[in-house]
Amino acid sequence: MTVMSQPHEVRRQEMADRLIGGSMRRSYNSAIDIDWDAPQDPDLFYLPPETISLYGTPLWEQMTHAQRVELSRQEAANMLSRAVWFENTLNQGLLRAMLYQDPTSRNVHYALTEIGDETRHMIMFGRTVSAIGARPYRLSKLEAWTVQRLPSLYKGLLLWGAALCGEELLDDLQRKYARHPDLQPIMQQVMRIHVAEEARHIRYAREGVLRRLAHSRWYERRLARELNGIAAFVLRRIFYDKEVYRRCGLDVGEAMRQARANEPVNAIRRESFRGLYEFFEDIGMMGRFSRRMWRRYGFLE
């Protein structure tokens, strides 16, 4: 790890100042920056077709174009619905951390700025689900119980690691496909806004990981190194939801089987995970259990 010549706290405050400046120059308000009333083309997809779970499978080949578009709409609604609860838990984690920090610090001010961004994202995601004519995907009672307890675990390295796991992979996918020619304009607009603002959040979270690593105890490092693999299970759950296939009128069991075995789509997700994986490997944040989990759920070969 590179040793910084500047005092640590000075460097941290300067980075927060730059991020706040970036937020002032380039932030969005989806209420006015998205054309919510624009007509949607029935032939265009709500997610890039090559990223849809059943793309290229025998089931996909049997579907009409309208059925494929509907599958993309349901998968988009599921992903957006799940993103709302993730942003919710991340905001709670940041707020809890601030209880122990200096409220005059520029670092705290940027954290509050990010919370504002994430709150607007939650509104944007919810409004998008409604705008595309889908019903939201709700958490089960067990999922809701689990999610309510996540913020209490978001401390130190676990907070910053969770932020990266929840942000980087989906950000990479959106960055690659936001200008896809077969994508609905409303989804292009949502992705572009999210990518532009998420770049700052990812930089902040990476800095948080590196800063905490330099000052954490061995057991905190070991816990974070192993537990980040749980994110693989959560992401897999987002990508493959039985209710999506049920709403599309598909054979749920067969759809799940074919989707999970869909190597081309799995390869796209592995590629999107590569940057985060290399970062974690570089700094010693990828343990035996976490590596096994990422591999088991299809993000590593």
Image: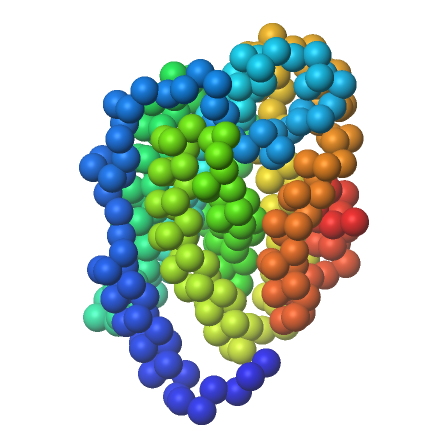
Q: Report the residue that reaches farthest toward the bottom.
A: 5
Residue 164 at x, y percent in the picture? 52, 55
Q: Report the residue that reaches farthest toward the top.
A: 249
Q: Quadrant of residue 15?
A: bottom left
Residue 43 at x, y percent in the picture? 48, 18
Q: Report the residue that reaches farthest toward the front.
A: 181
Q: Quadrant of residue 287?
A: bottom right
Structure colour scheme: rainbow
- Residue at point 68%, 36% (across, down): 265
Task: Report the front residue among 141 and 7.
Answer: 7
Q: How many marks?
A: 0
Q: Is residue 57 left or right of residue 124?
A: right
- Residue at point 39%, 45% (across, down): 192
Task: Report the front residue among 41 and 100.
Answer: 41
Q: Is residue 200 left or right of residue 30?
A: right
Residue 184 at x, y percent in the picture? 42, 28
- Residue at point 49%, 65% (across, down): 206
Residue 233 at x, y percent in the picture? 65, 40
The vertical placement of 253 against 164, above or below, is above
Q: Is residue 253 left or right of residue 213?
A: right
**Residue 246 seen anywhere in this rendered image of the structure:** no
**Residue 263 seen anywhere in this rendered image of the structure:** yes
- Residue at point 36%, 52% (across, down): 197
Task: Report the front residue among 237 and 124.
Answer: 124
Quadrant placement of the N terminus: bottom right
The vertical placement of 102 against 244, above or below, is below
The vertical placement of 277 against 264, above or below, is below
